[in-house]
Amino acid sequence: MRRLFPSPDSLRPRAPFSRWDLVVIPGILVLLSLLTVALEGATQPFGPRSPDLTVSLEPVYLPYYSLRSLLRMLLAILLSLSFTFVYGSIAAKVPRSERVLIALLDFLQSLPILGFLTASTAIFVGLFRGSLFGLEAASIFAIFTSQVWNMTFSFYSALKTVPKELVEAAAMLRLSPWQRLWKLEVPYAMPGLVWNAMMSVSGGWFFVVASEVISVAGREREQYLPGVGSYIALAIQQADVRAMIWAGISLFLLVLLYDQLFFRPVVAWAEKFRLEQSGAANTARSWVLTLLQRARLTQRIARLPAALWEWLWLCSARFSRVGSALEGRLTRRRRERLADLGFNLGLAVASLSLLGVLLSYLFGPGLGFQGGRMLQPNPNLNRNFSPELARRFASLGIAPGADRTVWLSQLCAASQGGQVVREEMRTLLHEPEVGAPANLVEACSRPLAPTGKVAWPEVWEVLKYGLCTMLRVSAMVLLAACLWTPIGVYVGLRPTVAQWAQPLAQFGAAFPANLLFPLFVVALANLRLNPEFWLSPLMVLGTQWYLLFNVVAAAMTLPNDLKEAARMHGLSGWAWWRRLVLPATFPALVTGGITAAGGSWNASIVAERVSWGSTTLVATGLGAYIAHWSTGAFNPHVGLGMLVMGLLVLAYNRLLWQPLYRLAEERYRLD
Amino acid sequence: MQSILSATHLTKSFSTPEGRPFTVLDDIDLELKEGEIVALLGRSGSGKSTLLRCLSGLVRPSWGEVRYRGQRVKGPMPGMAMVFQNFALFPWLTVQQNVELGLEAMGVPAPQRRRRALEVIDLIGLDGFEKAFPKELSGGMRQRVGFARALVTNPDILFMDEPFSALDVLTAESLRDELLELWSERRIPTRSILLVTHNIEEAVLLADRILVLSANPGRLMAEVTVPLPYPRKREHPVFVERVEQVYRILTTRPGLEQPPAEAIGIGHRLPRAPIGALEGLLERVAEGPGFGREDLSKLAGEMQLEVDELFPLLDAAELLGLAVVQEGDIRLSPLGQRFAAASSNTRKKIFAERMLLSVPLVGHIHRVLQTRPNGRAPEERFVRELEDYMPTEEALAVLAIAIDWGRYAELFEYDYNAGVLYGEGAPSPGT
């Protein structure tokens, strides 16, 4: 049927601008200029002779600092996205590669993120020699490592679960791999990717605050990159309450802006990629997206690259070439089996040699043994890496290392095995911050590990720390679950309450909890509470929200007929909980628990060792151990801590969460 | 007439986890000629969908070859298009973008793409919906998009994988009529259509030739030609006769008059027959006007059962000796008569007796559970045994049927959480 009348769309005069553009055009200009300012600041020269970087606690500078932090977040998420596309595609498409890549990803995501900071600083400073961007890159990399893994996982698993019929349709239409990626795979992965990116950014704020203060090898003092995180770190160091309040306000605004201007529009836009063929009930909305979609200028800008896109598109087209079959002629051939064997063999050799390199890096010559005897830990006596103590050691003829380390072996050498201890040395060794052994003679009589290396007894010690942290994480997540499940169910069953509670919980997850740590320090110090016990809640302070909003979502989607059936049968009180609510919210509880526990492990590095001004509280645990050694250059102690934490988290997830998740999937899913 | 597509000695087999071949399609020769619609018909397990995928190049056969206009098919060829059972539309693309997709792969520039897509959208009766997303459309409209996307490339040969089975009866009817109209009036350049269906009437309505496949492994069993002009009337005597004929073919076992009770072993693929439906069918036949004998085509029409649903029920009834299926008719055995009239408890008893006698897998499970001191065995044990005969997926499906039947007959029980089978009376693993 031909249309007799032109559509109303084509009758309207096509002015280049609409009234929405009045808002959009200035908005774009402001954004561009802000970006320029931030980039300029981030690429200033920075060499060995440049003065130490520092921040000012004047609130006037906060907007600029926020801008710089925001830029770091933006670059980190872009980096994460690119990594996700490349890594996820390779893992899903290249045969056999997934066996290595996915196992690696699993391990990497359980590694403590902040540990990467010490590892990467040296590399990036060397890479961008003479520019501040080296330090910026180190900070961005730390944020990147906090965001990327779950995004990559989600993309990879989406690629593996593209519905078979759609894959067949794409093959039948003879789409080229490039076309298939953009028309099928990326759109299919989009909702999961956006959701995971949002989770990642929420977690990212926490690490922005923790990753802007960087120690650089060869510099006396730590470098404070201009940013909100540095501002907070300095405020904590100087115990400046006013500055902390300012930082809190600006972070609140930042998170709000990021949510409104960036994520809400993306989430609303990603709605259209949902696979459900029916119209979903509650679709996300965003005023920014509406604004952008109605403004003509942005529509024009969006159409600019269309020509290039079309060109790329047609270049990759198959024209009249034959498409590729989805399934080969024979399912298994001998040659393939041989290749398989070779691959596995290569893999085994590679991982064994990697293990060898790792062990010799950690333990040094003889892998922790000398003359058949086990080497003993050779601890750093300058436990706080304080410059003052380093100077005093130097005056005694014991030269501290580049990052102000003073090893027990050095002391033994200077005192001839602990036999000759001069008066000044004795007073120095009795300082509370110096970790000298009580019986120096005995400690020196045993063979010590080479300086900076780890000894086997230390490994057991670290494992013990790890178990302490595991206990804390489990107890706190359990406690948070007990606390938030009733509240979440209460909220979720009341749609009007849930409407404003849900964004609030998401906001809570994004707001960096480390800002509130000093409150705890002050309270614990004043009430003289045991930090071993009372520092634990800090670990779930930022991650408990995942439990809350997952439970709220589950309670909101509790089917009406189940609720009615429960009412008909007079279920009430405990029976109502046990038979209806707990089973129905169990999958959400597990999903939230996995996220919360993972976040808590990571947070332990910041939460087991907190300070405010001159007060520092430490709880025994793996996080405190890593935080303790994470000053200055990357060293085997940090390496050991990260390795142990990585393996523990891996085991923890495999042995505890995975069975729970499977149970939830198989038994308690409501569909 | 010129041949468009041909397959010679086409065989497709997969390997079981044990490495043994598991043949799905066995030595199939067929030819598609210009100007004809061919329907592939068979019970579930006959590999008709796999055959379609082999012919279209989506899947390479293990043996033999497929040629399209003389060229060897190594992947989907230009000139081929497919319509899918569940539409396979890209939900994030509008109707028009979905339709244009077929042209994009061919490198057609944007303006031509747009023009051509609008033409086809017009042809298929979708105009006004160009900007709609698939989720806004009804099932019938979605399948129209599926047709438009296939037809936009002017395909020479059109493959259809049960294209109407996800639609309701009325919508399917009208869409079929429209397709036939386009076809017989030559408004589409397509020269041949290959259709997979499990609806016998649909096959007779549409096809010039019906190829009937046997199950396990799939072989070409018979060919039925339908020499009727379009549009075909269901009341036409030839139509009725052809439907009857197809039923007769499907219910006749090649070479064997009786069900081979002694030949089946543990690896026999149990028919996917839900107990409730089986009871319903037997009751209906027993109480019907034929007193235990019923014409299958009539029964299927009345109970609205398609081949995929009806034949597993018949197979199960025959396997258990409750009925005999012959010449397109079902006849209850005396035992079947008793079963249909019995109370629920007696039925279970009959069922249990018959199963132990004639379903080796159930008998085997029963025996194993009885010999075990605690009367329990993990399901993996049986899955592994079944994997000697079939791929894992199939083994799980077969075991699920055995468990369903065994539970009904109260021969054994199954704990879902633990994945453990246990004898009647043995303590449940959960307690």
Image (cartoon, coloured by chain):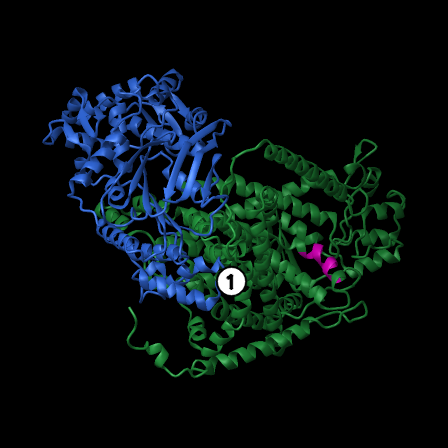
Chain colours: A green, B blue
**Which sits in the foreground, B289 or A606?**
B289
Nearest the eye: A84 or B323? B323
**Is residue B28 at least partly visible in the picture?**
yes
Position of residue A421 measured from the top left corner of the image (x, y, whole percent): 88, 48
- Mark 1 neighbour class, 10 Å CA radius: few under 14, some 14 to 19, many 20 or more: many
x then y, percent, for residue B209: 30, 40
Was residue A120 drawn as part of the magenta stretch in this picture?
yes
Q: Is residue B364 above or below residue B150?
A: above
Q: Is residue B226 left or right of residue A439?
A: left
Residue located 39% across and 37% down the image = B30
Report the front residue among A138 and A642: A138
In what element is the residue under mark 1?
helix
Report the residue at 55% width, 53% height from top.
A152
Q: Is residue B97 magenta?
A: no
Segment tinted magenta in the rendering: A117-125
Q: Residue at horizontal 52%, vertical 46%?
A: A474
Q: Residue furthest front?
A: B1
Could you tell me which chain the residue with mark 1 belongs to?
Answer: A
Q: Main secondary structure of the magenta part?
A: helix
Identify residue for label 1: A510
Indicate left or right for A526 with B294 as reference: right
- Total tally of numbered discs in the picture: 1
Q: Quadrant of the N terminus of chain A?
A: bottom left
Q: Is residue A543 visible?
A: no
